[in-house]
Amino acid sequence: MNAEPRPAAPVPDSTYVDVAAMPWKPTRFPGVECKVLMEDPATGMSTALMRWAPGAHLPDHEHVEVEQSFILEGSLIDRDGVCTAGNYVLRRGGSRHDAWTEEGCLVLAIFLKPNRFFDRPE
């Protein structure tokens, strides 16, 4: 007897993420951890919760496309200023800088494409 194939389950309109149940994953940058909430490998778009320890530093990098950051806790610093808890910073495509935190921070970051880093050859 051959079983008839089942129709594929419909893709839901909403995807719920249990962020608290996700483990923090280290990045290659000391003191910077993340939880990737959404990632589209085809386009490079992603949304991540980033946790920076006090004194953490992200080396020289370029924002290939727009990056949006909403600071949930602490503060994030670059040569243009300081973004504090409850505030937002937009980084335009093609912009280049390094970033750091003195007190630590928790950031909701939205990337249209991954950043390009210059601290080591790709």
Image (cartoon, rainbow, N blue to C red):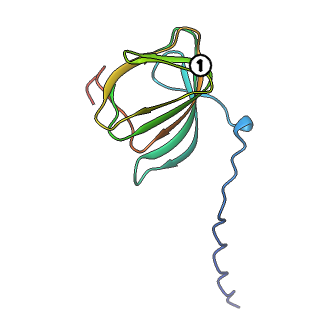
| Quarter holding residue 58 | top left
Name the residue type under label 1: Cys
81 above or below 1?
A: above
Say which quadrant the C terminus sits in: top left
- Describe residue 117's horizontal placement relative to residue 12 as left or right: left
Spot occupied by residue 118 in the image (x, y as percentages of width and height): 28, 23
- Closer to us: 101 or 122: 101
Say which quadrant the N terminus sits in: bottom right
17 above or below 57?
A: below
Q: How many marks?
A: 1
- Closer to us: 119 or 93: 93
* Residue farthest along the left direction in this orientation: 121
Spot occupied by residue 109 in the image (x, y as percentages of width and height): 52, 35
- Describe residue 19's horizontal placement relative to residue 74 as left or right: right
- Closer to us: 20 or 120: 20
**Residue drawn at the location 35% of the way across and 41% of the way down:** 65
**Residue drawn at the location 74% of the way across and 35% of the way down:** 20
- The answer to whether any part of residue 59 appears in the image is no
Residue under label 1 = 105
Q: Secondary structure at mark 1?
A: strand
